[in-house]
Image: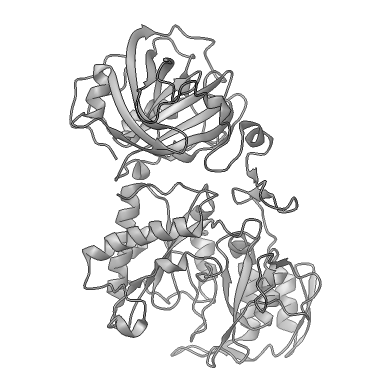
Amino acid sequence: MVKSTGGRKAQPGQPSADASGPAERLARYQAKRDFAKTPEPAGAASLAAGSGQPRFVVQRHRARRLHYDLRFEIDGVLVSWAVPNGPTLDPAVRRLAVHVEDHPIEYLDFEGVIPRGEYGAGDVIVWDLGTWAPRADEDPMAALASGTFHAEVTGSKLRGQFVLVRSGARGGGRGGGPGGYGGGYGTESGQEQWLLLHKDDEFAVDGWDPEDYPASVISGRTNDEVKADPDRMWRSDLPPDQASIQLRAPSVSYPEVTEDELAALDALGTGGLWDVFGRQLKLTNLDKELFPARPGEPAVTKRELLRYSAQIAPVILPYLAGRALNMNRFPGGASKPGFWHKQLPEHAPDWVPRWDNPDAKEGRTTTYLVVDEGAALVWAANFGALEWHAWTAPVTDPHHPSYALIDIDPGPATSWDDVVVLARLHRTALEHVGVRAQPKVTGRRGIQIWIPVVSGLTYSDTRVWVEQLSKTIGSVVPELVSWKWDVRSREGLARLDYTQNVSNKTLVAPYSPRPAPGAPVSAPIAWAELDDPALAPDGFTISSVLDRVAEQGDLFRTVLGPGQVLPPLT
């Protein structure tokens, strides 16, 4: 993030150059919007400040009039201008740019439809996105206050040196109120007008027109496509039946198991037919002990696992639905060796959801279970799957993950306190760069952190980013971390395993049981719980986590929110 070191106080209508923080500077933005109606981000103070090379975004915004919103990350906010005709690489062209209110950092990847009646109503795409640098020895906020602002941008479409020069003119308002130029252009009297130009450098292109490049750089969609379906994108490189890609988790409400259905399970002897979630399952060996007992507790039976699977289904399904499932099966119970089972067996009922992998190589898994309904999860548990590992990419777009994954994998010499230290360092780092993420204990000895990312990133993108972040953290506590691949070479130290960010290599799903005594669960936690001395990696079990969800809700739901651009870490 670019930090200002000073500068004179701005005049009314100019970008602020005083010492007010992001919260104060976003007050005008927030006062104009009803966040119960608009999908725009409200601007969380904890996410306002980033670090590393600052970012910029250009959004193509069709409100009352088409315009482009140009925003630069400075001092924890996006300093913004509305550019009616859009930026250009043509050095002979001068564009009008009207300064509007500062926007929150989360606006960097906002793409969607602002509803009718709301401020700036219309469709928005992320037309360009990248990083920028100020001119050497130039304080950005002081430059803004002086009326001449230089920025060298590195985006997907825009490159090179841009200059904004305040013209001194003030707009008189053009049809104020909701639905004008988004972000405020042309809607308020007294807004500063600037001129935007591109210098005649190596990136200059005569006659360059932004309208020749209409697609979003994060979803590939046009404004028309966003308007038609804000939550989906069209992938022209995929077969027609797979080309419509879900961008955000659908707001689906999954049915809960009924008391009558649970009573019917309890009434069965060692086996029988169970009608649950509208499906009929044949159950066997219901009193078989699947998880060994913990001291002072009884062993956990197959009946209890199936009961838990049915009860947790509406909570866990948003993390499993639409994704291939890798099952870790323990037919003999958790006290005996298990094995990975990925291929959906031929004897699976016809109603069980499945996906045929078009990229399957000869001799590899061709058909996967997809847990799109509660009965499918119960079926998997009855099949001996004690662990559930869903792919991080949906089956509709299997080469582009929805999450970046951080795996704090302890070694034999790693204490639980050491694991918590590493998790806290990641918490601090993620807050520092303004990235939303959520942790969960593994149910074994470690902690994992999931980061929702924008559509279109490859596994290589997420792996490189997580590697850079984790190696930076590892350099702070080198006595705790080994980067050796072979377990025997790590001398018992922890590994920050960024290599989990690869196709078909998964982390255990939230709320999945683990094959260990007492049936522990990989349970989501709040970040603040890292400071609770009572926290344990295997402290939540299938007999206790349901009460926790009932009391606190699903603490992992934040990862189902909008995906994020992973900011530069240099």
Q: Where's residue 141, x and y in %?
A: 25, 27
Left or right position of 214 against 268: left
Say if 512 sits above or below 456 in the image: below
Q: Where's residue 245, x and y in %?
A: 65, 49
Q: How is the image coloured?
A: one colour
Using the rendered image of the protein, determine whether residue 155 is visible from the camera's viewpoint: yes
Dividing the picture into quadrants, the one containing residue 492 is bottom left
Left or right position of 29 against 257: left
Q: In which quarter of the image is the N terminus?
A: top left
In the depicted view, which residue is nearer to us: 96 or 43? 96
Say if 357 sits above or below 297 in the image: above
Residue located 72% across and 70% down the image: 375
Say if 323 sits above or below 337 in the image: above
Left or right position of 49 against 285: left
Please count the marks in the image: 0
Dividing the picture into quadrants, the one containing residue 446 is bottom left
In the depicted view, which residue is nearer to us: 268 or 222? 222
Q: Where's residue 305, x and y in %?
A: 61, 80
Residue located 79% across and 67% down the image: 278
Q: Where's residue 30, x and y in %?
A: 43, 30
Left or right position of 522 against 159: right
In the depicted view, which residue is nearer to us: 135 or 318? 135
Using the rendered image of the protein, determine whether residue 42 is visible from the camera's viewpoint: no
